[in-house]
Image (tube, rainbow, N blue to C red):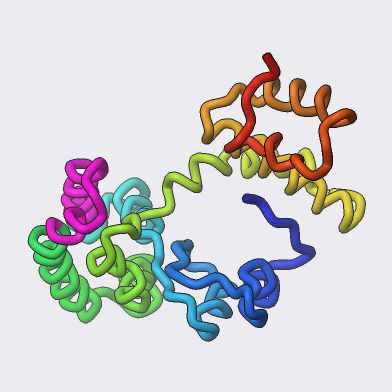
Amino acid sequence: MFEFSEGRSGESVREFLKLDTPQARQGTLLTDGFSGYNAATTKGVTSAQCMAHASRKFNDLWANHRSEVGRKARRYHQCLFRIEREIEDRPGDERRRIRQRKSRRVLAVFHRWLLEQRRLVPVGSATMKAIDYSLKRWTQLTRFVQDGDVPISNNWVENHIRPIAIGRSNWLFAGSLRSGKRAAAIMSLLHSARINGHEPYAYFKDALERLPTHPASRIGELLPHRWAPAS
């Protein structure tokens, strides 16, 4: 689901999750480190953050400076993601048990190593910033160990929004608030069609052709997760 907002403030997050209403969404919110999401955690939402985003900080250190800290941190992250690949098809309760047995040990060693390295690196350096990114978010980054239904990263979402991120300059100006909301609705339908295994053009063509004569009381039948081609 895509939502359009005029800014990046925490207020937009609270409104989207309806946090100040009886219909407030609950559960765990998996995000990157953008501070605007903090607005949700003060309203009862549990924060989990993306380990892949933390890993990229160290990948950059290794790629740009051949930093030994970057190289060693990458090894820890690779180990964690290898465990995740092995258990990705397991039920949530089983994933949690394996994470508690394997991932928690890796994280304990990794955390001690980060603390040691933090005392050795120069203040204000890129290495210090990469380490601090993880240490300041450690509880949120390791939330997946306590909850088998929480992914280690939000790469799945990132992959789905990549076409929009790449083409954002093409629709940088929506024209109006109403246009932006309409664009978000269309993107939501398009990506939902893909997730449900439909070819987006076939879905839109069929739904739009049926829409003028389709009963309003049964409009839900044309949503991607319920849609079936007209016979």
User: Residue 73 occupies which quadrant of the picture?
Assistant: bottom left
State the image coordinates of residue 38 (x, y, percent, origin top left). 53, 78
Q: Nearer the viewer, residue 43 or 24?
A: 24
Would you say 81 lies left or right of 48 here?
A: left
Q: Nearer the viewer, residue 158 or 135?
A: 158
| Residue 43 among magenta residues | no
Dominant SS in magenta: helix
Would you say 181 lies left or right of 230 here?
A: right
State the image coordinates of residue 55 (x, y, percent, origin top left). 33, 56
- The residues colored magenta run 73-98
State the image coordinates of residue 150 (x, y, percent, origin top left). 34, 60
In this view, 93 is above or below 158 = below
In this view, 222 is above or below 68 = above
Q: Which of 190 and 117 is in front in this view?
A: 190
In this view, 111 is above or below 82 = below
Residue 68 visible: no
* Residue at x 20%, y 45% (from the top left corner): 87
In this view, 204 is above or below 188 = above
Would you say 29 lies left or right of 109 here?
A: right
State the image coordinates of residue 65 (x, y, percent, origin top left). 32, 52
Q: In which quarter of the image is the C terminus?
A: top right
* Residue at x 52%, y 27% (from the top left corner): 197
* Residue at x 33%, y 70% (from the top left corner): 134
